[in-house]
């Protein structure tokens, strides 16, 4: 009798789950297709640039497969729909490049992320995942509603502040003073004000330099005068000539919110 009751309970549970899935799918029946991909998907909001010129950041959703492919330049094929304030992303397949960059890696793609949406739905065959999303001037917050095959890499992501820049410096072990010396130049400039990203969330600027003997933590500033910020390129040039020896293991980079970047190793 006990085994019979357990059997009935299991059938009932499966039936309920099936009914829930059918009910969920019926809401998106017009968007469901036979196309699907054989991989889970990781995703995160990012702000990127599509040119090397002056440009404000563009808000995108970065999609990355958990599955690794034989070529690092494979991409995801998707179709996007907007329904009221909901972004619906349907996965169509994997696009294999004609020229294989011979390194393994995930397939990747970017889709536009409208600032007015409050919900994201992913469709992969008959599987449907949904998330709530809040986008404001300071941060992007994502919370799962139901997820089976997708994973939000960051629940909180800071936006790139307007009129901001990051100071990113790496040194060798015998010239670490360069980091603090140039930081002092920035701090003493009345047009620049240092700030920190407060609270939890992924910071959109580099957290530190990379590949140096000493990778110092990045520092973040806003500027009140764009012309003063433009002068920073010349200031960095002069400082580099006077203080940074060639092949000394020192790099200084300034990354700005609108894609203006300065580097110690080239003429700005």
Image (spheres, rainbow, N blue to C red):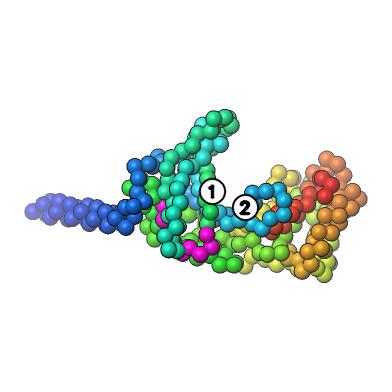
Contact (Cβ within 8 Å) of mark 2 with mark 1: yes
Residue 230 screen position, x and y as percent = 81, 59
Residue 57 screen position, x and y as percent = 64, 57
Q: Which residue is mark 2?
A: 48
Residue 136 screen position, x and y as percent = 56, 67
Q: Is residue 257 left or right of residue 228?
A: left
Asked if residue 118 lies in the magenta stretch, the reply is yes
Q: Is residue 11 visible?
A: yes
Q: Which residue occupies the foreground of this view, 117 or 108?
A: 117
User: Of callouts 2 and 1, which one flags the residue occurring earlier in the amino acid sequence?
Assistant: 2
Q: Residue at x 82, y 45 (%)?
A: 266
What range is drawn magenta here?
Answer: 114-122
Q: Is residue 164 left or right of residue 63?
A: right
Q: Residue at x 34, y 42 (%)?
A: 34
Q: Which residue is mark 1?
A: 110
Mark 1 residue element? strand
């Amino acid at each position: 009798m006990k085994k019979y009751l357990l059997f009935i309970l299991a059938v009932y549970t499966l039936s309920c789950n099936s009914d829930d899935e059918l009910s969920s799918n019926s809401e998106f029946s017009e968007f469901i297709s036979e196309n699907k991909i054989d991989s889970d998907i990781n995703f995160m909001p990012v702000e990127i640039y599509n040119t090397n010129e002056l440009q404000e950041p563009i808000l995108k959703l970065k999609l990355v497969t958990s599955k690794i492919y034989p070529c690092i330049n494979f991409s995801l094929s998707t179709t996007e729909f907007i329904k009221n304030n909901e972004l619906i992303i349907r996965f169509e397949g994997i696009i294999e490049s004609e020229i294989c960059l011979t390194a393994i890696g995930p397939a990747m793609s970017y889709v536009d992320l409208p600032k007015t949406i409050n919900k994201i739905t992913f469709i992969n065959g008959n599987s449907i995942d949904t998330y709530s999303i809040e986008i404001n001037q300071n941060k992007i917050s994502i919370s799962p509603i139901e997820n089976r095959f997708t994973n939000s890499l960051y629940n909180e992501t800071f936006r790139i502040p307007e009129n901001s820049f990051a100071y990113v410096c790496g040194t060798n072990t015998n010239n670490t003073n360069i980091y603090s010396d140039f930081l002092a130049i920035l701090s003493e400039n009345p047009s620049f004000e240092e700030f920190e990203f407060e609270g939890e969330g992924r910071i959109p600027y580099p957290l530190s330099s990379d590949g140096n003997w000493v990778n110092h933590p990045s520092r973040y500033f806003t500027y009140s005068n764009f012309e003063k910020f433009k002068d920073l390129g010349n200031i960095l040039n002069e400082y580099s000539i006077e203080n940074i020896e060639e092949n000394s293991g020192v790099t200084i980079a300034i990354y700005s919110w609108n894609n203006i970047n300065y580097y110690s190793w080239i003429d700005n």
